[in-house]
Amino acid sequence: MRLHRAGQALVDLVLPSDCAACGGPEPPWCGPCGRALGPPAAAHLPGGPQVLAAGRYTGPLRAALLRYKERGRRDLARPLAALLAGPLHDLAPPGGPGPTWLVPAPSRPAAARARGGDHVLRLCRALSAQCSNVRVAHSLRLDRRVQDSVGLDAAQRAVNLRGRVSIVSGRLPPVDDRSLIVDDIVTTGATLRECRSALARSGVSARAALVLCDATGRAR
């Protein structure tokens, strides 16, 4: 019996055993939640990179992200990554001369420890495993002085991050390959802008970003 339970726990860790959003018995998405996910859409981000989101930060997508990010459901990385596969191919059509590199937006060190690891990095690895010729470059890190952005307005978020995204030595993608920044949510765009600037200072051009949820004030 103990061996059976241990085996089932391992399966649940690797394969979702319920709906990613509502916890119902139909993995990875039950019918109502799947129909409510909505189509991918471009996020409106003035002065930032081109951004394509799997959907708005609402409904089943928001619920699934919160379960994955804040409630320890690491197994949801796979179904969430699957939602990014279509937008990824729109931004970086397969068949190019070199690989596409996913560069995860960094988390605050304390937040990553509390969540049991970097959830955006895990998401990128799950997406890379599902798509051919896609690799992950864990190139960026946040200064420990960066504060939690909850409750900060757009100007405060920009000040909080300014100059505090840096490069991890030896982990940059090749400058001639295509690179995309990946994050879970875009709200004001401060994180994506700082990530793009840090990469640009090192010669890497990341002209587009891929995110799960668009929480900007306007989408188009």
Image (tube, grey):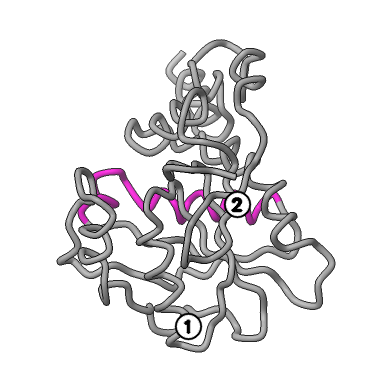
Q: Is residue 68 located in the magenta-colored stretch of the structure?
A: no
Q: Amino acid at mark 1?
A: Ala
Cα distance, mark 1 to mark 2? 20 Å
Picture layout, residue 178 above or below residue 22: below
Picture layout, residue 34 above or below residue 78: above
Q: Residue at x 54, y 82 (%)?
A: 204
Locate residue 206, reporting x and y percent. Answer: 56, 73
Q: Amino acid at mark 2?
A: Leu
Near mark 2 (Cα within 10 A), the count class, few <14, some 14-19 or many ≥20, is: many
Side of 107 where 152 appears, left or right? left
Which label number is shown at residue 200?
1
Q: Nearer the viewer, residue 168 or 86?
A: 86
**Figure quadrant of the C terminus:** top right
Locate residue 11, reporting x and y percent. Answer: 55, 29
Side of 160 where 98 appears, left or right? right
| Magenta range | 110-130
The residue under label 2 is 52
Which label number is shown at residue 192?
none
